[in-house]
Amino acid sequence: MIRQIHSRLLIGKFPGKERRNGKEAGRSIGPASQLPGLAFMNKLIGIVLIILGCLLFVQGLNRKDSLVGKASDAGTSIANSVDGGSRTPKHVMYMVGGGALVVIGAALAFKSSSTV
């Protein structure tokens, strides 16, 4: 049995393969975008990432406008002026991270699936 499989691997003859125009036409797994359920999952994951990105961005905006955000801005500007560092407040990271999630989610959700 193992010898038969090994010889088929060396020769390249498997059941189900046919020859069309001089080339083997077997069942091979193509790119992931050609699988039927994967395109739906990519769109679903993309929409979830867009929603999470929007929520994270809004959380950053709310934090910026709150008392904690004002104190964070003041503390960051004082610390940057003292030692010359380049710190950023946490709400800026929330907004940047939310924007990045929205961009990645949009790329996944609105990417056209190229099936042959």
Image (tube, rainbow, N blue to C red):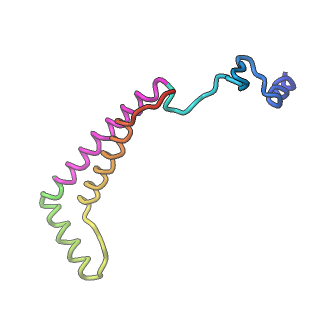
Residue 58 on the magenta span: yes
Q: Which residue lies furthest to the right in this view?
A: 3
Q: Is 111 rendered above or below residue 25?
A: below
Left or right: 96 as drawn, with respect to 22: left
Q: Residue at x 28, y 50 (%)?
A: 99
Q: Where residue 57 sits: x, y (%)?
A: 23, 50
Question: Residue 108, percent across and down?
Answer: 38, 38
Residue at 72% in and 20% down: 19
Residue positioned 60% across, 28% down in the render: 29
In percent of width and height, residue 11 lies at 82, 28
Q: Is residue 112 left or right of residue 17?
A: left
Mainly helix, strand or loop, the magenta region? helix
* Horizontal side, residue 20 vs residue 42: left or right: right
Segment tinted magenta in the rendering: 36-61
Q: How many labels does the image show?
A: 0
Quadrant of image for the N terminus: top right
Q: Residue furthest front?
A: 21
Q: Which residue is drawn at 31% across and 53% down?
A: 97
Quarter holding residue 96: bottom left
Task: Look at the picture and state if 17 lies above or below 79.
Answer: above
Q: Is residue 10 above or below residue 75?
A: above
Say whether residue 42 is magenta: yes
Q: Quadrant of residue 102?
A: top left
